[in-house]
C-alpha cells in the first residue's frame, strides 16, 4: 500500500525535467533524488515527503532512455507515479529499478495538488481521499509485483538465484 500527498504535473514531462542532464555524471539514487524535478519545479524536493506521489498527464517520462529519471524519483523517496500514460522506455526502466508506476487516466484527471492519495498495487485500486473517489486499474502480474517488491529487477533475480541454490 502506498499513501502520500499528490504533486501534479502536466503532459509530456520529459526525462530532462525529471532529472536535469547536468546531474547525469552520477548514478547514485540519493544524489539524483536530491535534484528530482528540479527544472520543472525548483522547490519540489523541499516540499515533498517520503511516500508522496507524482501525478501527471500523458506521456510521462518521454525523452531519453536512461534509467536516471526513474532512479531520481525513487531516490527522492516518492512512493509512486500515477499518470494518464507513460513513455514506453520510462515504463520499462521504472519497473526495472522497482519504482511503482500506474497508468490510470481517470485518477490522473481527478487528483489535484495536495490530495491524499492511496494506491493498492495488488488490488488495482487508487483512492483519492481528497475527493473520496476510487479508481480501478489492471494490477501488475505477480512477477512484476515481485520485481517491485524486491526493489527492482536485479535484486529480484538475485533472490530467485539464491532460492534456486537453496
Image (cartoon, grey):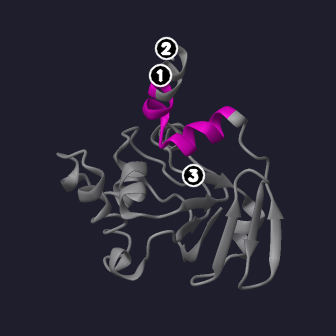
87 over 131 or under it: above or below: above
157 over 46 or under it: above or below: above
Q: Residue beneath label 1, please?
A: 162
Secondary structure of the residue carrying tag 1 is: helix
Q: Residue beneath label 2, please?
A: 165
Q: Toward the viewer: 113 or 121?
A: 121
Q: Is residue 74 magenta?
A: no
Mark 1 neighbour class, 10 Å CA radius: few under 14, some 14 to 19, many 20 or more = few
Q: Toward the viewer: 104 or 13?
A: 104
Q: Is residue 146 magenta?
A: yes
Q: Is residue 15 visible?
A: yes
- Asked if the residues shown at circle 2 and circle 3 are in contact, with their CB atoms under 8 angstroms apart, the answer is no
Q: Image quadrant of residue 45?
A: bottom left
Q: Residue beneath label 3, please?
A: 100
Q: Is residue 2 found left or right of 54 in the rendered image? A: right
Q: Residue at x 36, y 55 (%)?
A: 72
Q: Residue at x 63, y 59 (%)?
A: 83
133 over 55 or under it: above or below: below
x, y percent for residue 85: 64, 52
Find the distance from the CA under tag 1 to the CA under tag 2.
Answer: 5 Å
The kind of secondary structure the magenta stretch mainly shows is helix
x, y percent for residue 40: 38, 70
Mark 3 neighbour class, 10 Å CA radius: few under 14, some 14 to 19, many 20 or more = many
- Asked if the residues shown at circle 1 and circle 2 are in contact, with their CB atoms under 8 angstroms apart, the answer is yes
* Closer to viewer: mark 3 or mark 1: 1
Q: Is residue 29 found left or right of 9 in the rendered image? A: left
Label placed on residue 138: none
Secondary structure of the residue carrying tag 3 is: loop
Magenta segment:
143-158
Q: Is residue 39 found left or right of 154 in the rendered image? A: left
Q: Residue at x 75, y 71 (%)?
A: 127
Amino acid at each position: 500500500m502506498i499513501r502520500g500527498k499528490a504533486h501534479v504535473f502536466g503532459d509530456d514531462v520529459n526525462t530532462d525535467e525529471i532529472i536535469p542532464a547536468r546531474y547525469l555524471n552520477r548514478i547514485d539514487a540519493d544524489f539524483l533524488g536530491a535534484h528530482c524535478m528540479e527544472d520543472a519545479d525548483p522547490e519540489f524536493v523541499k516540499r515533498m515527503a517520503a511516500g508522496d506521489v507524482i501525478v501527471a498527464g500523458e506521456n510521462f517520462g518521454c525523452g531519453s532512455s536512461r534509467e536516471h529519471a526513474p532512479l531520481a524519483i525513487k531516490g527522492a523517496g516518492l512512493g509512486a507515479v500515477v499518470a494518464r500514460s507513460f513513455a514506453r522506455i520510462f515504463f520499462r526502466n521504472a519497473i526495472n529499478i522497482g519504482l511503482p508506476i500506474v497508468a490510470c487516466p481517470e485518477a490522473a484527471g481527478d487528483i489535484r495538488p495536495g490530495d491524499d492519495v492511496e494506491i493498492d498495487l495488488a488490488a488495482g485500486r487508487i483512492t483519492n481521499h481528497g475527493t473520496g473517489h476510487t479508481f480501478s486499474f489492471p494490477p501488475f502480474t505477480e512477477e512484476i509485483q515481485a520485481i517491485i517488491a524486491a526493489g527492482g529487477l536485479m535484486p529480484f533475480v538475485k533472490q530467485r538465484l539464491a532460492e534456486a541454490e537453496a
